[in-house]
Image (spheres, grey):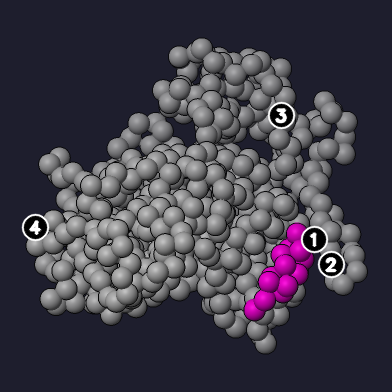
Amino acid sequence: MNDMSDIKTVTGAKRYSAGVMKYAQMGYWEPDYEPKDTDVIALFRITPQDGVDEVEAAAAVAGESSTATWTVVWTDRLTACEKYRAKAYRVDPVPNSPGEFFAYIAYDLDLFEPGSIANLTASIIGNVFGFKPLKALRLEDMRLPVAYVKTFQGPATGIVVERERLNAYGRPLLGATVKPKLGLSGRNYGRVVYEALKGGLDFTKDDENINSQPFMHWRDRFLYCMEAVNRASAATGEVKGTYLNVTAATMEEMYERAEFAKTLGSVIIMIDLVIGYTAIQSMAKWARDNDMILHLHRAGHSTYTRQRSHGVSFRVIAKWMRLAGVDHLHAGTVVGKLEGDPATTKGYYDIFREEYNPMALENGIFFDQDWASLNKMMPVASGGIHAGQMHQLLTYLGEDVVLQFGGGTIGHPHGIEAGATANRVALEAMVFARNAGRDIWNEGEDILRDAAQTCTPLKQALDTWKDVTFDYASTDAPDFAPTPEVSA
Amino acid sequence: MRLRQGQFSFLPDLSDDDIRTQAQYAIDNGWAVSVEYTDDPHPRNTYWEMWGHPMFDNRDAAAVVYEVNECRKEHGGKYIRVLAFDATHGWESVRMSFIVNRPKEEPGFRVVRQEAPGRVIRYSVESYAVREPEGHRYG
């Protein structure tokens, strides 16, 4: 498979004579290594520069993401350096992708500060992504040992307690992002919230870039939104929420906004991924301390998750965010306007919602992962979805998900409340039919048409959007077909 | 107004056969089905009155429909819901909840606003019905 598989680690005094040595000879390539239960394991997709051997490239990634530098240093001998070296232990060619390899690297638990995503990522995706001998590098997946998982808080609320707080069971939750995303005054913005919640949605949502701008400062938005939330709650007898985006320039300002949301009685606040891992962990701790559901909008993730050869897979971001402690995170729709093939998306959803993820190469999951009773995250599906796809959404995404119909609510020909009602009726009819044993995948359109007979807004929604689909090839599909002979 | 709590409150009222199919789905999933009623439908009223214990060992949804109708005989003027509990580790909570009986008239809720400093308003949502004592609401 490669011409360096028999390369040996140099030992004894020779290992530490000054100069440059191959990473694979320095102890970063150990093909016989058996990862310990407490090791962190990372799977990288590596694309070595022409002429660079893949084993040396893998060893270099292991070295640069742990203890190594470009030359031998004698100070290694003052440490238990064999323990602290990350060990590349396996390199496989990527199926159907010449020049790309999967490198498995194990890291000792003592390399990481407990409970710190910042520390974990500073090692694993720190210097190494700019390393010259590689054309490209992608972090595909990680195995996080239980011993490390248990040092994190995990989701502040979790799916079960979120449902208990909302008094909403047995169906996906419904949401909508207020549109237009920029320009509405606080008073007009609250109108959209009121109409959508009264019509049947559980949540409305600020968009990622709604913070505190000249057309609507944050306090104004919060005040009008909470008027809308309470009026809608009285109109329906349900608990309602609106994701108040507290993203701001400093932690102090975010805390101030979060405290105000709490004072007003909001059940949920929101942050953007761009605030950074440490800020996310701080807000997750605040949310746990203040009985607040924490929504995370994954703003910016596609800059590093989308391309197959370089960056960080979203499944890794999802794992980090479950550790960091957010309750909601966007995870794709399969059928909507944004990137995501069904198999890969299923892998993400499993990472969010399961207690244990068995290895599933066909879904891009490379390791067994035990979540050690950490709370579950609620996936959020948004972007170009509408009531006419309800059977597909329920089949692909299941029940524990927030379905967010922004345009599919606010763009309804008869108004926002009608749009919300159309979505809610379609949803309830589909869940009812599924529970009653109907084959919703094949009979979905009939089920929706029947429900529309007693719901004019649903009929109008189905007529308006009946031909809308987003059918493009995915840029990030799994590398392995679901065939039994594939093994890791 | 129509109380929108539960899984199916935006659909037409459920027939006894509808209740049976949904309860059977719960039973087939291994969940325990129970019946509860209340005359205080506040969205945060967690503890409706229990019409007996959850039916842990019942395999037949016809028994659920029977209990719903027994409950209706005594509390037909109130809200009645069917719940399904999942005792599986990692959930250990409600999986389903749907309303199967309503008062003839549903007067709904009012918003009570208390004005506080800085344009803050403290909100309460209150059911019109709870102004009357328990047992004397909804006619």
Q: Chain of mark 3?
A: B
Distance from Cα at disc 2 to Cα at disc 1: 8 Å
Classify residue B94 as left or right of residue B1: left
Kind of residue at badge 4: Met
Above or below A108: residue A122:
below
Distance from Cα at disc 1 to Cα at disc 3: 28 Å
Residue A256 forms part of the magenta stretch = yes
In the foreground, A43 or A313: A43
**Label 1: which residue?**
A263
Count residues near mark 3 (Cα–Cα under 10 Å), then give few for <14, some for 14-19, many for 20+. some
Q: Position of residue B114 (x, y in %)?
A: 89, 59
**Label 3: which residue?**
B48
The mark lying in front, picked from 4 and 3, is: 4
Q: Quarter-wise, where is residue B4 in the image? A: top right
Span of residues in magenta? A249-262
In the foreground, B59 or A198: B59
Please tell me which residue is depicted at 49% across the width and 52% down the height of the picture. Answer: A110
Distance from Cα at disc 2 to Cα at disc 4: 69 Å
**Label 4: which residue?**
A1
Please tell me which residue is depicted at 51% across the width and 29% down the height of the picture. Answer: B89
Kind of residue at badge 2: Val
Distance from Cα at disc 4 to Cα at disc 3: 66 Å
- Asked if labels 1 and 3 share a chain, the reply is no
Residue A66 forms part of the magenta stretch = no
Q: Position of residue A313 (x, y in %)?
A: 35, 63
SS state under label 2: loop
Q: Which disc is residue A182 wearing?
A: none
